[in-house]
Image (cartoon, helix red, strand yellow):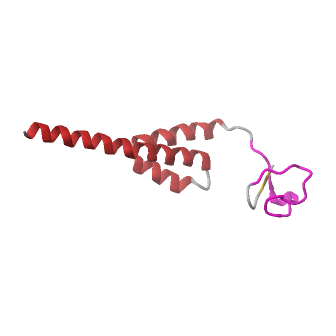
């Protein structure tokens, strides 16, 4: 179970969150969700889209960081990985273009 205020993991017997002091009455506790294969598929899909198109990955991160944080994190991470790769690729394109001109 997790605290709704800070997201800290709490036990069923706790009355208050040790991290933020939030009252853990039944209305303020989120039960731990079981693994959902749709969310796992979204992580893979978001990560692939982020790697293919860094702009799409960053947009997916911003749009989904609250609703699907793990999938959004994958999209943002792979987008950030792809940006330096793109810079290196374009650098070599430029260098080979210059070599052809000579």
Classify residue 74 by image quadrant. Answer: top right
Q: What residue appears at the point 90 percent right and 54 percent down from the top-left corner?
A: 14
Q: What residue appears at the point 37 percent right and 41 percent down from the top-left corner?
A: 85
Q: Main secondary structure of the magenta part?
A: loop
Classify residue 7 by image quadrant. Answer: bottom right
Q: Residue furthest left?
A: 102
Q: Position of residue 13 (x, y in %)?
A: 92, 51
Q: Is residue 55 left or right of residue 93?
A: right
Q: Position of residue 52 (x, y in %)?
A: 40, 40
Tell me how many marks there are: 0
Q: Position of residue 60 (x, y in %)?
A: 49, 51
Q: What residue appears at the point 30 percent right and 40 percent down from the top-left corner?
A: 89
Instruction: Give the quarter of the figure containing the C terminus.
Output: top left
Q: What residue appears at the point 62 percent right and 41 percent down from the top-left corner?
A: 39
Depth check: 27 or 17 in front? 17
Q: Which residues are magenta?
A: 8-33
Residue 60 painted magenta:
no
Depth check: 66 or 88 in front? 88
Q: Is residue 98 left or right of residue 5?
A: left
Is residue 25 positioned above or below 87 on the image? below
Q: Is residue 34 left or right of residue 92?
A: right
Q: Residue furthest right?
A: 13
Depth check: 77 or 58 in front? 77
Residue 27 painted magenta:
yes
């Amino acid at each position: 179970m997790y605290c709704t205020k800070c997201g800290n993991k709490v036990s069923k017997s706790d009355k208050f969150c040790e991290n933020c002091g939030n009252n853990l009455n039944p209305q303020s506790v989120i039960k731990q969700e079981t693994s959902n294969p749709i969310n796992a598929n979204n992580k893979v899909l978001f990560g692939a889209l982020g790697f293919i198109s860094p702009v799409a990955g960053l947009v997916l991160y911003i749009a989904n960081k609250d609703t699907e944080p793990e999938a959004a994190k994958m999209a943002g991470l792979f987008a950030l990985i792809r940006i330096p790769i793109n810079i290196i690729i374009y650098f070599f394109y430029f260098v080979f273009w210059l070599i052809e001109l000579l």
